Amino acid sequence: MSIEPIVLVVGDEELLVDRAIGEVVASVRAADPENEVIDLAPGGLEPGRIAELTSPSLFGGGKVLVLRSGQDLGKDLVAEVLKYAKAPAEDVVLVVVHHGGAKGKALVDGLTKLKARKISCPKVTKAGERVDFVRTEIRTAGGKISADAARGLIDAVGNDLRELAAACSQLVADTGGKIDDAAVARYYRGRAEVSGFTVADKAIEGQLAEALEQLRWALATGVAPVLIVSALAQGVRGLAKVGGAPRGARGAALAKELGMPPWKIERVQRQLRAWSGDGVARALAAVAEADEQVKGGAADPAYALEKAVAEIVSARAQRRAS
């Protein structure tokens, strides 16, 4: 077989682990579709079983042994796996899966020293990593998506990589490959509540009709008015913070100064191009008024929010008018 006889998959991101195993199996079966795949778990594995499964078969043919949850193997089984890995069989590929971490680390260290091929599948926990995952999925499927639209898809679908991968595939199939905020909203708006931040972004970017539509949907799906006005406030204050930042500050230094992630600062900087200082001040006043009304000063919080959204969009338009 052309593939390495020992493959070590380390990490606990299930989708990536399954894909790594699938790629190994596909490579092996490309040479011979009849090659057998045997899935093993520590719970049902007895000492001597590895030697039995890797011994030459009377009927010939290759095998892929997938040993899952390697961190749960006992010392005897770890020793057996490492002994086998020193002289692997020619027609067998052993894939050892380990969740990572300190438990069972001797197995990972031993296989690494024996030059096993290592595939890392760490948990995707950072927002930026999920955005990169979505954009890569879309690109692999033959499409293209902006970072903002990718964040919108994550907001709608959630953080589970399997669901995100399925959504990416479906979007490319349904849209022809070019995916923007409108496409994400059209296909996935019904899957999750619209957040107040969606409303805020639309308002700050001057999209009045879309902002009002998102606002009504958010209220209809149960988002509390106080959360929406809070998101509006955060969005407008973000304009003020970034707009008032020292001119020389950039990158990590600017992020630390403002207490905002770099991707958000970049987004706010793009938004600021259409704003003036007076416009931001007017928007801040509109948000403050809406906050007071939503928290008891108005009989109709929905109307107060609609008025605030319209005021924000109008304040943005001041730059074009001036």
Image (cartoon, grey):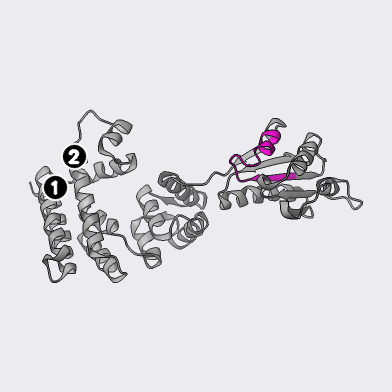
Q: Viewed as shown, does residue 56 lie left or right of 30? A: right
The outermost residue toward the top is 248
Q: Quadrant of residue 176?
A: bottom left
**Rendered location of residue 57, percent (x, y):** 89, 50
Q: Name the element at disc 2.
A: helix
Q: Viewed as shown, does residue 293 lie left or right of 26? A: left
Q: How many other residues sit within 10 Å of disc 1, few (<14), some (14-19) or many (≥20)? A: many
Q: Name the element at disc 1.
A: helix
Instruction: Tell me if label 1 and label 2 are in contact, CB under 8 Å.
Output: yes
267 shown above or below 302: above
Q: Which residue is mark 2?
A: 243
Question: Is residue 1 at least partly visible in the picture?
Answer: no
Q: How many other residues sit within 10 Å of disc 2, few (<14), some (14-19) or many (≥20)? A: some
Residue at image position (17%, 67%) is 301
Residue at image position (61%, 46%) is 99
Residue 48 versus residue 76: which sits nearer the camera? 76
Q: CA distance from mark 1 to mark 2?
A: 9 Å
Residue at image position (29%, 71%) is 220
Q: Quadrant of residue 303?
A: bottom left
Marked residue nearer the N-terminal end (1 or 2): 2
Q: Which residues are magenta?
A: 94-111
- The answer to if 188 sits in the magenta stretch is no
- The answer to if 96 sits in the magenta stretch is yes
Name the amino acid type tagged 1.
Val
**Rendered location of residue 166, percent (x, y):** 51, 59
Residue 75 versus residue 269: which sits nearer the camera? 75
Q: Viewed as shown, does residue 321 lie left or right of 155? A: left
Question: Is residue 34 at least partly visible in the picture?
Answer: yes
Q: Which mark is residue 280?
A: 1
Q: How many marks?
A: 2
Residue at image position (20%, 31%) is 246
